[in-house]
Image: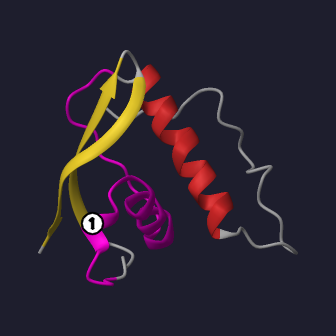
Amino acid sequence: MFQFDPSMPNNDESWKLEERETIQDVTSRVNRFLQWLCQTRWETNIVVVSHGVWIECCLHACSPQALASGDRVKNADLFVVECISINGQFQRFQNVRRLE
């Protein structure tokens, strides 16, 4: 079943027309999301859908070897990842693979 987080606002207050996010900004969002995910979701299979740049930043930060060949992540690319957490704290990704 799909549910939006009830605390999610209708408008993204962090988005600004006149200012682009840096890679560090995106990576910071990735890290906050992974901590939230590990602290609040206990399911064993979760689908995360996002833009290619967000997923690329996520893989570079959490599993650099997944893109070691210099591949880029494109929108609609599919990856399977095992997300390892301990006591609700994100630790690492393992067994990352791109679905063809």
Is the N terminus in the top left, top right, bottom left or bottom right quadrant? top left
Q: Is residue 59 left or right of residue 31?
A: left
Q: Is residue 64 visible?
A: yes
Q: Is residue 77 visible?
A: no
Q: Which residue is mark 1?
A: 65
* Image position, residue 88 (x, y; %): 40, 19
The residue sitting at 65% across, 62% down in the picture is 24
Q: Quadrant of residue 80?
A: bottom left
Establish if 24 lies above or below 40: below
Is the C terminus in the top left, top right, bottom left or bottom right quadrant? bottom left
Which coloring applies here?
secondary structure
Q: Which sits in the foreground, 69 or 6?
A: 69
Q: Is residue 87 left or right of residue 45?
A: right
The residue sitting at 36% across, 35% down in the picture is 91
Q: Is residue 99 magenta?
A: no
Q: Is residue 32 left or right of residue 55?
A: right
* Image position, residue 48 (x, y; %): 36, 49
Q: Which sits in the foreground, 15 or 26?
A: 26
Establish if 92 lies above or below 16: above
Stretch of the chain drawn in magenta:
42-71
The residue sitting at 45% across, 21% down in the picture is 40
Residue at the left extreme, as displayed = 100
Q: Is residue 19 left or right of residue 53?
A: right
Tally of marks: 1
The residue sitting at 34% across, 64% down in the picture is 64
Q: Is residue 44 magenta?
A: yes
